[in-house]
Image (spheres, grey):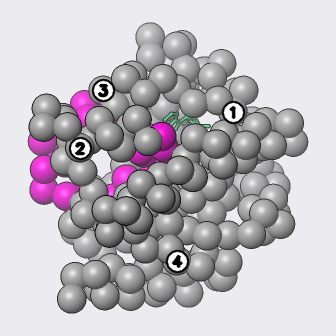
Amino acid sequence: MRLVLMGPPGSGKGTQGPALAAALGVPYLSSGDLLRREVEQRSELGRQVAEIIDRGDLVPDDLMIAVVAAALGDAGDRGYVLDGFPRTVAQAEALERPASPLPSPELVVHLAVPDATLHERLARRAADEGRADDADPAVIARRLHVYRDETEPLVAHYRAQGSLVTVDGDAEPEEVARRILAAVHATRG
Ligand code: AMP
C-alpha cells in the first residue's frame, strides 16, 4: 500500500503515521522529521533548510522530491506511508511523471480538523517537544496560511483522481486510527 497522510500542522499525521505504517507493513517517512534531523546534524542540506523551516515556509519542490526519494530508496516501490509529502501540486505531479523516482500514492488520507483543535494541539506539542516552529504564533499562522494556499489544492487534485478519502481527525488518537484503518479497508474492497 502506498499511502499519503495529508492535513494541516497539528492534524495528527505524525501521531497516526508510524502505527499505520506498521499495521500496513510498509516504511513510514515524515518529510518534516527528515529535515529536522538534517538541521540537527548540521549537514549541508540542514543548513539550506533551517531558516525556511523556522519561517514556516516550504522547502523548494525539486530539493524536497530528491530528499524524500533518496530517503525511501527502493523500499518506496514496495509501499509507504508518507507524512507531509507531497505538500504542493508540483510535488504530486512530479510523482506522476514516468521518470519519477517514487511511485504515486494509491490512497491519500486527508485528516480534517477544525482550526481551534489545531491551535490547542500545536500549543501542547510546543510544550512537549520544544519545536520552535510550534511555539511562535506568527510562524503557526504562516504555516496554516501556506497549508491553505499550497497544500490544500492537493485535496481537489487527488479527489479528481479518485484516490482521496477525508477522515474526521477531531477525536482521540485511538478513534482516529480506527477511522483511518476503516477507510483503508473500504478502499481495498
Ligand atoms: P512538518 O513536520 O511536516 O510540519 O514540516 C516542518 C517543516 O518542514 C515545514 O514547515 C516545511 O518548512 C518543511 N517541509 C516538510 N515537508 C515539506 C514538503 N513536502 N515540502 C516543502 N517543505 C516541507
Mark 2 or 4, nearer chain start: 2
Disc 3 to disc 2, C-alpha distance: 14 Å
Image vertical order of residue 93 relative to residue 41, above or below: below
Image mark count: 4
Disc 2 to disc 4, C-alpha distance: 24 Å
Q: Mark 2 vs ligand 1: CB under 8 Å?
A: no
Pointer 2 residue = 96
What segment is highlighted magenta in the picture?
A: 68-88
Image vertical order of residue 139 relative to residue 28, above or below: above
Disc 1 to disc 3, C-alpha distance: 20 Å
Pointer 4 residue = 167
Quarter where residue 187 is shown = bottom left
Residue 32 locus on image (x, y percent): 51, 40
Image vertical order of residue 131 relative to residue 157, above or below: above
Which amino acid, by three-letter code, is at mark 3? Ala
147 to the left or right of 177: right
Mark 4, secondary structure of its residue: strand
Q: Is residue 77 magenta?
A: yes
- Any mark on residue 93, and which? none
Pointer 3 residue = 66
Residue 4 locus on image (x, y percent): 38, 58
Disc 3 to disc 4, C-alpha distance: 29 Å
Which amino acid, by three-letter code, is at mark 1? Gly
